[in-house]
């Protein structure tokens, strides 16, 4: 057979079998998404600048709605899902239509996708400041919004795969693979991590608790980085960079390897967010191993991009688009080198909970995502509006101020993170902590907080320049839609039947090996490991050899696969699911049966539970961890290392990821109630120099105890061992505990205290942290400690 | 080391097996990519280029 057979769509046929068709692309959708991305990018980064200011200067907190704990989730969600989200939709729609030579099939779906997504963003911008949150990072939005996200994502997927189905170019370019992986994986991640039991219209509890919730959350969180901030943007890079440079990608072979290795490896690396915690060791080790492996595909991709410009470097100097792409790839390389480094337990021990991580994510978000977005916009908008960019000079200025801004940001946060990390662990000759007062370590980094604000603001100014430049370009031009002429066959070429693909060698190989391993696992755990490794090696070598030896003229398996969007998608999802399942299932299934854990654990009393909900609502977890790591310097400061038992009934878990303030896992009994009272109203009154926001409204707002029993009932249904008696007595128990705390506060000199005020509930929760009340014995003892 | 791991739960054979499987797939993909014909690759790589009329 000839080479044409490798391209089922371009089978040699009689001249009469072809017709010429004109395609006008739907570029309106890309114009809208670009506009939305720019607007939300400005909003998200403005909020970023505000939260940066709040950390440097606490007066910028405006309680109750605009405190750091409520705004930080707004900032992260806006940048990830509104700025990068809209940018990615713009790029995917623009490039996909052109790569597969087909117009989007439905203008209606396009409109629903666009307006639906903007409505979700607006609802996030409203609910997050209101304190409506699930308390899981980058997944804070409450369940009705989660459902809306699912619906809109399905609309996007339908539109996308429908376009592929109508394509007139059979081969799927590598960018499309990245998009497919994005669409499918994000769907899985979002659904699994959002599993929650709704209690009220805008309140739910995560289905998972404690370590399980932590593992699911960071499997999600890490892969949100992978499949929202990385894979779609890599796809965009593989399309727009060659276009802007007017030369094909450096190595298509490398891009194939890049794709498969990236999606196979990424899905595993989540536990590197939980190193040195109470998470089982094996999961931590897996996280480290895969993170280190991730370095290779990441750099493969970066080099593939940069080498594409081989021989075109002269162009980079004059073309702002290429300048942005090159800088973006460089930051991608930097961030993906730093990531594996941070995944080593020892480095992580220093860096985790500090601003080093903040430096890392901003190298990624501002450097890689932000600069890629800018490059893509500067390339696309002139073409979408049929005129040259309004000002190349302004784009150059944006480039320099933006890049300088990132560097300032990243350097200040590195300095801050390492400084504070070292101070936390510093001990004197006698082994005592050198800086026992947390505020001392905070004051040491305050200058860095100001420098970060300056760096971030410079970047924001660059964004405003871009918005202005793009707006002038659009206003001076007029909307034009791309067109193409394609030659298509009148009769659809016969594709290789499914059976041939399904029973192709790679599928058979993988299935056989899996079955073998599964069988052996059942028969004998230990022997199976050695055996299965041998089997795999033999099978791989054998099949490869066989494959190389057989008739080379038959259509290639992988080529057929690429022509088969659906099958390709299934394999991608299997790849991704296999990683997720293999990692998650053992944890999800094993932990709850551990009798020792269950013996130690005790659910919260009614009022403590209400206090915990306030803790989640106020976003305290954005500044406080509840996870003491097994380091001497840490146990000296905070007490014994945290155990799995202590958080097993925490839905959602509150281990946290950043210590702007101290760890609270063993906060109970550390201070008297009145200390907490004064501290929560205004932290400076008892802790001079603190940057914790003031929460005066907690004093006047009261807890609605009529709803407590319903909440406990919901938790009971997902495995928290409340008995019906406790639930029935929820209200009286909460009132009793509240009265006790209120009396104690009054005794200590607080004038007016409402026993049902939120501050009393929150204090009840804080005083419970790290405490193990004795097990419930009889009906009377059960409710009063 | 494996023994220690498996004592915790036989289910832990899952991640280990999957990891080996992934390594195998990686090797297979790498070999496939390396052995594909130059024309195929060049044709695919050129897909983004010259796909559109530039209206500027």
Image: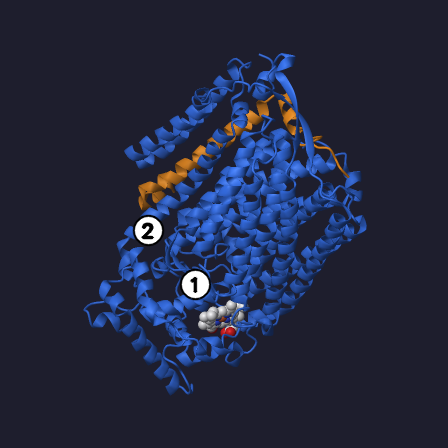
Chain colours: A blue, B orange
Say which residue appears at 38% left-offset and 52% top-offset. Answer: A212
How far separated are the C-alphas under marks 1 and 2? Answer: 19 Å
- Observer able to see residue A309: no
Residue A503, position in %: x, y? 43, 21
- Secondary structure beneath label 2: helix
The label shown at residue A324 is none
Question: Quadrant of residue A356 in the image?
Answer: bottom right
Q: Is residue A68 left or right of residue A574?
A: right
Residue at the extreme left:
A778
The residue beneath circle 1 is A626
Seen in the picture, residue A688 relative to A179 is either above or below; the reply is below
Residue A643, position in %: x, y? 36, 59
- Secondary structure beneath label 1: loop
- Front residue of A549 and A289: A549
Residue A462, position in %: x, y? 72, 56
The reply to whether callout 1 and callout 2 are in contact (CB within 8 Å) is no
Residue A658, position in %: x, y? 51, 61
- Observer able to see residue A204: yes
Question: Quadrant of residue A778 in the image?
Answer: bottom left
- Front residue of A36 and B26: A36
Say which residue appears at 56% left-offset and 18% top-offset. Answer: A491
Chain letter behind tag 1: A
Check the picture and name the quadrant holding the N terminus of chain A.
top right
Chain letter behind tag 2: A
Say which residue appears at 35% left-offset and 29% top-offset. Answer: A515
The label shown at residue A591 is 2
């Amino acid at each position: 057979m000839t080479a044409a057979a490798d391209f089922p769509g371009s089978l040699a046929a009689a001249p009469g079998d072809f017709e010429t068709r004109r395609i006008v692309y739907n570029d309106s959708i890309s114009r809208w998404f670009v506009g939305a991305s720019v607007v939300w990018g400005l909003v998200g980064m403005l909020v970023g600048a505000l939260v940066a200011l709040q950390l440097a200067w606490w007066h910028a907190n405006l309680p109750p709605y605009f405190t750091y704990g409520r705004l930080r989730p707004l900032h992260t969600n806006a940048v990830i899902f509104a700025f990068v989200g809209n940018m990615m939709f713009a790029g995917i729609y623009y490039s996909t239509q052109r790569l597969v030579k087909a117009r989007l099939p439905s203008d209606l779906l396009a409109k629903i996708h666009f307006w639906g997504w903007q409505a979700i963003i607006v609802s996030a911008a409203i609910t997050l400041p209101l304190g409506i949150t699930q308390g899981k990072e980058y997944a804070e939005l409450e369940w009705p919004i989660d459902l809306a996200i699912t619906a809109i994502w399905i609309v996007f997927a339908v539109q996308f795969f429908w376009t592929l189905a109508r394509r007139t170019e059979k081969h799927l370019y590598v960018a499309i693979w990245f998009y497919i992986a994005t669409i499918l994986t994000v769907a899985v991640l979002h659904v699994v991590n959002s599993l929650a039991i709704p209690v009220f219209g805008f309140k739910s509890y995560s289905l998972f608790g404690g370590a399980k919730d932590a593992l699911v959350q960071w499997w999600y969180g890490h892969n949100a980085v992978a499949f929202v901030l990385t894979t779609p943007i890599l796809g965009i890079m593989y399309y727009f960079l060659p276009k802007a440079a007017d030369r094909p990608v450096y190595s298509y072979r490398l891009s194939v390897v890049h794709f498969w290795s990236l999606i196979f490896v990424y899905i595993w690396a989540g536990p590197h967010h939980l190193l040195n915690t109470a998470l089982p060791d094996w999961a931590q080790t897996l996280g480290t191993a895969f993170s280190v492996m991730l370095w290779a595909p990441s750099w493969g991709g970066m080099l593939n991009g940069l080498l594409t410009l081989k021989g075109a470097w002269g162009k980079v100097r004059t073309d702002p688009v290429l300048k942005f792409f090159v800088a973006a790839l460089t930051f991608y390389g930097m961030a993906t080198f730093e990531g594996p480094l941070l995944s080593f337990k020892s480095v992580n021990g220093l860096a985790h909970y500090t601003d080093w991580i903040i430096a890392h994510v901003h190298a990624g978000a501002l450097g890689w995502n932000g600069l890629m977005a800018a490059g893509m916009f500067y390339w696309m908008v002139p073409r979408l509006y049929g005129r040259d960019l309004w000002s190349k000079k302004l784009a150059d200025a944006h480039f320099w101020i933006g890049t300088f801004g990132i560097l300032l940001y990243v350097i200040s946060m590195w300095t801050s993170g390492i400084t504070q990390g070292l101070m936390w662990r510093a001990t004197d000759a006698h082994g005592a902590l050198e800086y026992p007062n947390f505020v001392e370590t905070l004051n040491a980094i305050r200058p860095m907080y100001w420098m970060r604000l300056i760096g971030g603001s410079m970047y924001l100014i660059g964004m405003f320049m871009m918005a202005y430049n793009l707006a002038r370009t659009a206003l001076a031009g007029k909307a034009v839609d791309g067109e193409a002429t394609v030659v298509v066959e009148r009769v659809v070429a016969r594709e290789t039947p499914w059976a041939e693909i399904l029973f192709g060698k790679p599928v058979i190989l993988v299935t056989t090996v899996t079955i073998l391993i599964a069988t052996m696992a059942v028969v004998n755990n230990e022997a199976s490991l050695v055996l299965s490794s041998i089997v795999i090696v033999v099978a791989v070598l054998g099949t490869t050899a066989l494959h190389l030896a057989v008739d080379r003229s038959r259509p290639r398996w992988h080529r057929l696969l690429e022509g088969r969007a659906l099958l390709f998608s299934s394999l991608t999802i299997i790849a991704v699911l296999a990683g997720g399942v293999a990692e998650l299932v053992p944890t999800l299934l094993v932990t709850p049966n551990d009798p020792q854990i269950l013996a130690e654990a005790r659910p919260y009393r009614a009022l403590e539970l209400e206090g915990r909900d306030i803790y989640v609502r106020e976003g305290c977890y954005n500044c406080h961890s509840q996870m003491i790591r097994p380091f001497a310097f840490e146990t000296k400061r905070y007490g014994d290392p945290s155990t799995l038992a202590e958080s097993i009934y925490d839905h959602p878990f509150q281990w946290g990821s950043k210590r702007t303030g101290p760890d609270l896992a063993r906060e109970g009994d550390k201070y008297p109630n009145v200390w907490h009272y004064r501290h929560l109203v205004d932290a400076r009154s008892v802790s001079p120099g603190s940057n914790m926001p003031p929460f005066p409204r907690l004093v006047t707002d009261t807890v609605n105890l009529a709803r407590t029993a319903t909440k406990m009932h919901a938790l009971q249904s997902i495995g928290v061992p409340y008995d019906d008696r406790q639930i029935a007595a929820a209200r009286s128990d909460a009132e009793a505990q509240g009265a006790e705390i209120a009396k104690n506060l009054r005794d200590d000199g607080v004038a007016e205290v409402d026993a049902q005020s939120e501050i009393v509930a929150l204090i009840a929760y804080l005083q419970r942290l790290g405490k193990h009340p004795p097990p419930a014995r009889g009906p009377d003892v059960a409710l009063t400690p | 080391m494996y023994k220690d791991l498996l004592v915790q739960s036989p289910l832990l054979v899952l991640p280990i097996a999957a990891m080996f499987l992934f390594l195998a797939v990686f090797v297979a993909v790498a070999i496939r990519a390396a052995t594909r014909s130059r024309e195929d690759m060049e044709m695919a790589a050129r897909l983004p280029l010259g796909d559109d009329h530039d209206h500027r």
